[in-house]
Every structure is written in structure tokens, then in C-alpha cells.
Amino acid sequence: MDGQDTQATGAPPVVLFDFDGVLTHADTYALFVRERYARSAWRKLLALLALPWLLLLWPLTRRLQRPLVHIALLGMDERRYRATVEAFAAGLVRRPGHFCRDGVRALRRHQAAGERVIVVTGCEHTVVENLLSQLGLTGLELVASRLRPGAFGLRLAHHNVGAGKLKALATHGVPAWRRAYGDSLHDLHMLKAAAEPVLVNGTPKLCKRIERALGRSVERVAWH
């Protein structure tokens, strides 16, 4: 994948946006999980009881977050999950400072220019879908993390991060893109494959690391 501009094929240019850190100022799914724990004493107790086991596993897996997400989703089927997400999204869109106004404006400009805009994120699909809808951002494509039903509730099926974003985009039928907006090293693969990589609110140190990894300069934007 070499970031070939899709204009060469007559198709609209493809523009990718990460979600957290680009269109928002915080980790959206972490906020959702925290809300699940805040509303459920038994979930907090279960997480506390599981903590010694999780700390033993942490040096081997470095994945404390996944079991904590699974505990947050215990007992939830897809219908209940969707209703919970809709309520969460309705509250979050009214919370000042969560969304990046400049990022949303940039996304709208790309849409107005007739470009194919795809939000590519590690956040969960239903959460992002609801938030984009409530923000009035329609006509977008979404490639995000997915859940699956399990014996005790919903579980993470695909975590759409890092190189996994490239595989998910290929499955989505997107082999190349012109421009990509990211905010961290987790977006490195997505940025590397873009003809025009853009780093959002990156520190000078992060910018140097990404440019070293890309072997070329990266456009930097400061968004609020």
C-alpha cells in the first residue's frame, strides 16, 4: 500500500480520520466503561476481586483493559447494549469540551469537497456510530472495533488498532487513501500508507518519532 491517490482511478479521494484525539479530546470508550462501573456496585466489586489475578497476568499480556471492559459488559445483550449506548451518547454530546470543534469542521470540509470520508478508530462501532449521528455527521463510513455475543455478555471481537486498521480497511474495500489524520503512534500504519499524513496536536517529540518512522515529513495541525 503506497498511498496512491484514488483520483487516478476516477474515484473520490479517500480521507481517513481517527476518532479519539482527532475528533474528540478524550478516550470515549474509557468514559463509557467508567460510567458502567459508576452505575454498578457489583461490577466495581468484581473488578476489585479480579485485580490481583489481572496484576499477575499484566507482565505477560500488558492487557489489563480488555478484561475490565468484559466485566463492564457482563450480562448485556445487544439490545440492552444499544439502549445503554444511546443514553450515553445523548449525554456526551451535551458535555462541553469533549469534541474537537476544529476536527469536526475539517471533516465537514472534506465532505463538502466531495471526498470519501472514513472514520477509522479503535473505539467501539455502536458508540461512535451513535455519537456521529447525534452530532449530525451523516454520509460517513465507519471502520471501528466490534463486539460479539458471549456466554456472559458482550465481548471484544476485533480491536481496531495499529496494523489492524489496515486489515480492517482492506476488508472494507479500501486499498489506498490520500490523506489521513492521526494523533499517536497507534496511527502510524495508517499515516504511513497515506500520501498526505497529518498529525493532530502532536508534541515535537511525537512528531520527530513519527517522521523518523515514516522517513518523511508530516503535516502538523493544532486543533481545539
Image (cartoon, rainbow, N blue to C red):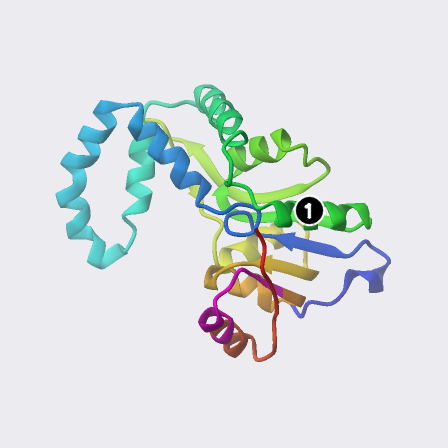
Q: Amino acid at mark 1?
A: Arg
Residue on which the image places disc 1? 105
How many C-alpha atoms fall within 10 Å of the one at disc 1: few (<14), some, or many (≥20)?
Answer: few
Q: Is residue 25 visible?
A: yes
150 or 17, nearer to the observer: 17
Q: Is residue 159 above or below residue 217?
A: above
Residue 116 placement, left or right of 209: right
Magenta-colored span: 198-208
In percent of width and height, residue 178 lies at 72, 62
Q: Is residue 155 visible?
A: no
Residue, far right: 10
Quadrant in which residue 46 is drawn = top left
Residue 74 placement, left or right of 141: left
In percent of width and height, residue 186 lies at 47, 60
Q: Residue at x 43, y 39 (%)?
A: 29
Quadrant in which residue 138 is drawn = top right
Q: Residue at x 44, y 45 (%)?
A: 27
Q: Find numbered disc 1 in the image and state the secondary structure of the residue it sits on.
A: helix
Q: Residue 38: within the magenta?
A: no
Q: Residue at x 55, y 37 (%)?
A: 128
Residue 151 placement, left or right of 168: left
Residue 91 placement, left or right of 39: right
Q: Is residue 205 above or below residue 156?
A: below
- How many badges with numbers are in the image? 1
In percent of width and height, residue 175 lies at 68, 59
126 or 26, nearer to the observer: 26
122 or 150, nearer to the observer: 122
Q: Residue at x 44, y 19 (%)?
A: 80
Q: Is residue 139 above or below residue 7?
A: above
Q: Quadrant of the N terminus?
A: bottom right
In percent of width and height, residue 10 lies at 86, 58
